[in-house]
């Protein structure tokens, strides 16, 4: 098909030129003597004017058109369009292909439900806002290639069919047709491979890698996703983080023109949990958590006497809107975190009110009000229980109120590193010790003394980059000593046979002069989501799954034929039989 340029290549300087354009009929307006057609291509929309007497075929929305015409200046410019100063006076229009009436409005604002958008994703992708998201995604990738290549990084692909290895999340397994009963695993990340590349002497590797995790889904998570995977040799933590900050600064500048101020601040993991109730704190607003255990244990409330943790937050200027219904909803939310409930205290005409006040004397009331600097019409939400549950609950409530009260200024960004993560944590289900990040994380030198006596006290050289309350990336310094790696596997409860079966080749590789190395992975999808200004990761993935892990367009996952199962040596059991 002949085309002289894209729509948005044209501007006021092109007035009088003859052009040939291709695109879709976005909108059609017939004013009798004049017919206006908004022609949309990937670059944007331009108005086409068909004057009375010009013969054209019947045109409907989403018809594919070829337009021959002349660039003209508009009498009144449309400031909402890149091409708003000009229009095309049509000489001839050819219908390249017809289209059915689309099941959704193809515009920035659409009334379609998300499942409809996903079912007709190829139409949803025509919406200008969607194309904007993918332009941002593309610019991120271009910046990554340019920045890292200039720092002597080399891009290397790693396998997609791997050996199964326990790294935290559940894996997707791929049965082998040749070796019945054996399976490949799709990589949760290229973790061991990129460390092996450091052992291989490449020193600086990166890859825009596809990864797979069989996890429950949410707004910022997909079963298959893309990460910007990076590994380096011979850099300490500060050197590596400085290098990554430079990449983030370039990405922000090249995609949305935002200047990130460096260096980024660093917040210790414990401070993030203590003060924000999250290891990915949104620091664009205040509303900090307060540790009031010592204070509240002076009350006469027996439930506080043996509490592991007691904390609270202040929410400003909402007491008059905090009804019994609101308090009941807070208590229901607390139960989701396995907490008994909350106490909500209101400041009304400089007096503290609420059912809990009866357990406090005036000195304690004054102390509490002073701690939170509570003023008239503020509320204080207090809860007690296990430390991790109390902080997680209040962190969630903090974020809910921030959205509800519009505490976050639009188009603002706050970036920081969260550092000094614990090396290990206990699995909630079976109380076994598991790796907080992954089993290849290097313990901090000053914490090694606790490996034998109290592993849960060990801190690690781990770091997450947090942007606006999202974990946008994370990584660690790696273990490069084979004896230390063996010890970490043993603490995680792996037997010698399990270590050999799962990681034998990796342990062997560590014996051949492994350099100190560090790395991280940025979530490309999350970066595109944050920079695009959406809160739904599915908006920045071309063909995503819904929250049920299903692709409404293709129907995946689908059943396969019996002959395919026979070839793979598989028998499908009824789910009830396996319970």
Image (spheres, helix red, strand yellow):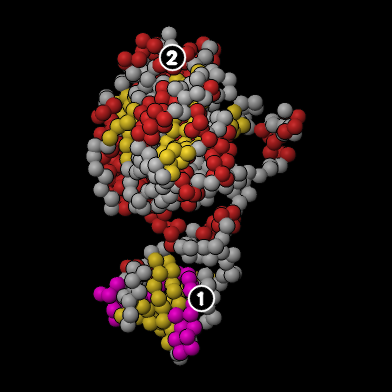
Q: Above or below — where is 561 with respect to 338?
A: below
SS of the residue under disc 1: strand
Q: In this rendered view, identify the residue nearer to me: 517 or 202.
A: 517
Q: Above or below — where is 172 with respect to 16?
A: above
Q: Specify which label sits upstream in the sequence, 2 or 1.
A: 1
Residue 285 on image: x %, y %: 36, 43
Q: Going 36% across and 78% down the picture, which residue do you hit?
A: 87
Q: Going 72% across and 28% down the picture, which residue do you hit?
A: 578
Residue 138 on image: x %, y %: 38, 51
Q: Is residue 47 left or right of residue 576?
A: left
Residue 369 on image: x %, y %: 38, 35
State whether the magenta stretch is mostly helix, strand or loop. Answer: strand
Nearer the observer: mark 2 or 1; the answer is: 2
Task: State yes or no: residue 63 in magenta.
Answer: no
Residue 2 appears anywhere in the view: no
Determine which quarter of the picture holds residue 155.
top left
Region rendered in magenta? 11-36
Q: Going 40% across and 76% down the picture, which residue do you hit?
A: 47
Residue 234 appears anywhere in the view: yes
Determine which quarter of the picture holds residue 60.
bottom right
SS of the residue under disc 2: helix
Q: Which residue is mark 2?
A: 455
Give the total number of marks visible in the rendering: 2
The C terminus, quarter of image: top right
Q: Which mark is residue 95?
A: 1
Q: In this rendered view, identify the residue nearer to me: 354 or 182.
A: 354
How far apart marks 2 and 1 lie (CA) works out to 70 Å
Q: In this rendered view, identify the residue nearer to me: 418 or 369.
A: 369
Q: In this rendered view, identify the residue nearer to me: 119 or 2.
A: 119
The N terminus, quarter of image: bottom left
């Amino acid at each position: 098909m002949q085309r002289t340029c894209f729509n948005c290549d044209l501007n006021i300087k092109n007035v009088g030129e003859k052009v040939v354009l291709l695109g879709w009929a976005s909108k059609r307006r017939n004013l009798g003597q004049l017919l206006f057609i908004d022609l949309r291509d990937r670059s944007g929309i331009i108005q086409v004017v068909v004057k009375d007497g010009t013969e054209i075929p019947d045109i409907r929305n989403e018809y594919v058109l070829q337009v021959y015409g002349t660039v003209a200046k508009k009498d009144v410019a449309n400031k909402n369009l890149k091409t708003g100063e000009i229009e095309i006076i049509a000489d001839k229009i050819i219908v390249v292909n017809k289209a059915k009436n689309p099941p959704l409005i193809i515009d920035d604002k659409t009334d379609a439900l998300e499942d409809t958008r996903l079912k007709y994703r190829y139409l949803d992708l025509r919406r200008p806002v969607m194309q904007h998201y993918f332009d941002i995604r593309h610019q991120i990738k271009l910046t990554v290639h340019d920045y890292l290549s200039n720092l002597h990084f080399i891009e290397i692909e790693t396998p997609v069919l791997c050996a199964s290895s326990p790294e935290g999340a559940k894996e997707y397994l791929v049965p082998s047709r040749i070796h019945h009963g054996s399976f490949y695993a799709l990589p949760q990340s290229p973790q061991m491979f990129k460390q092996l590349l450091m052992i291989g002497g490449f020193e600086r590797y990166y890859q825009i890698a596809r990864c797979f995790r069989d996890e429950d889904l949410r707004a910022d998570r997909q079963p298959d996703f893309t990460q910007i995977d990076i590994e380096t040799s011979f850099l300490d933590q500060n050197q590596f983080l400085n290098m990554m900050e430079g990449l983030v600064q370039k990405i922000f500048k090249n995609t949305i023109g935002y200047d990130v101020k460096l260096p980024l601040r660093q917040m210790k993991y414990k401070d993030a949990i203590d003060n924000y109730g999250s290891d990915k704190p949104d620091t664009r607003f205040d509303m900090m958590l307060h540790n009031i255990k010592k204070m509240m244990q002076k009350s006469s409330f027996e439930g506080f006497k043996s509490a592991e943790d007691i904390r609270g937050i202040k929410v400003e200027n909402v007491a008059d809107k905090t009804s019994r219904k609101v308090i009941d909803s807070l208590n229901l939310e607390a139960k989701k975190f396995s907490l008994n409930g909350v106490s909500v205290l209101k400041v009304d005409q400089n007096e503290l009110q609420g059912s809990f006040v009866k357990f406090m004397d005036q000195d304690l009331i004054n102390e509490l009000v002073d701690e939170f600097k509570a003023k008239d019409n503020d509320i204080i939400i207090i809860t007690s229980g296990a430390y991790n549950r109390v902080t997680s609950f209040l962190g969630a409530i903090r974020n809910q109120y921030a959205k509800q009260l519009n505490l976050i200024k639009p188009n603002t960004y706050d970036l920081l590193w969260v550092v000094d993560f614990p090396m290990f944590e206990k699995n909630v289900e079976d109380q076994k010790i598991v790796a907080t990040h992954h089993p290849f994380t290097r313990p901090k030198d000053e914490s090694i003394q606790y490996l034998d006596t109290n592993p849960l006290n060990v801190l690690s050289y781990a770091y997450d980059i947090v942007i606006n309350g999202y974990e946008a990336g994370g990584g660690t310094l790696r273990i490069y000593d084979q004896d230390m790696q063996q010890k970490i596997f043993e603490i995680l409860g792996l037997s010698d046979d399990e270590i050999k079966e799962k990681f034998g080749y990796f342990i062997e590789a560590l014996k051949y002069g492994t350099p100190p190395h560090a790395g991280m992975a940025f979530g490309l999808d999350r970066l595109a989501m944050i920079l695009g200004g959406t809160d739904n990761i599915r908006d920045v993935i071309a063909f995503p799954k819904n929250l049920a892990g299903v692709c409404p367009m293709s129907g995946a996952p689908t059943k396969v034929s019996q002959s395919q199962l026979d070839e793979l040596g598989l028998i499908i059991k009824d789910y009830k039989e396996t319970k």
